[in-house]
């Protein structure tokens, strides 16, 4: 996942949050789809795609954070 290291934190955070929270009104799609999933009504293909699309931003933030922590921990052990 070296490609993830090439993106600055600011780009990952702003892009990830913008994707997760879009559209801002009346409620973010990610929140709406998570509520549908919890209620058991997430059945249509477009809704599943929406969940994957809007969930990709937070997943990228999480992956970059885990990778950074792993690399920092590995670097501190090597010293």
Image: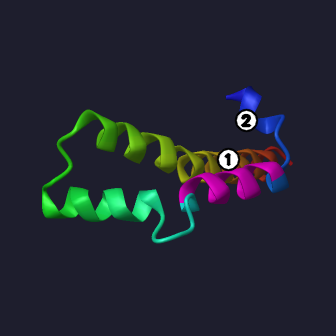
In the displayed structure, would residue 67 be above or below residue 62?
A: above
In the image, 63: left or right of 13? left
- Identify the residue at image location x=80%, y=46%: 75
Main SS type for the magenta part?
helix
Residue at image coords 74%, 28%:
2
* Residue 31 % position (x, y): 40, 65
- Indicate the secondary structure of the residue bearing disc 2: helix
Count the numbered circles shown.
2
Helix, strand or loop under label 1: helix
Q: Which residue is mark 1?
A: 64
**Is 7 on the left or on the right of 4, as rendered?**
right
27 or 56: nearer the viewer: 27
Q: Which residues are magenta?
A: 11-20
Kindly report the distance in space between the C-alpha atoms of the residues bearing marks 1 and 2.
7 Å
Per the rendering, the mark at residue 4 is: 2
Q: Is residue 43 left or right of residue 54?
A: left
Q: Residues within 10 Å of mark 2 (few under 14, many from 20)?
A: some
């Amino acid at each position: 996942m070296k490609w993830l290291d090439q993106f600055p934190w600011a780009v990952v955070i702003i892009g990830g949050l913008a994707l997760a929270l879009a559209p801002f009104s009346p409620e973010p799609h990610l929140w709406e789809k998570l509520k549908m999933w919890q209620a058991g009504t997430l059945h249509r293909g477009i809704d599943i795609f929406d969940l994957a699309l809007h969930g990709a931003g937070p997943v990228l933030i999480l992956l970059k954070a885990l990778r950074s922590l792993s690399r920092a921990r590995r670097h501190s052990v090597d010293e």
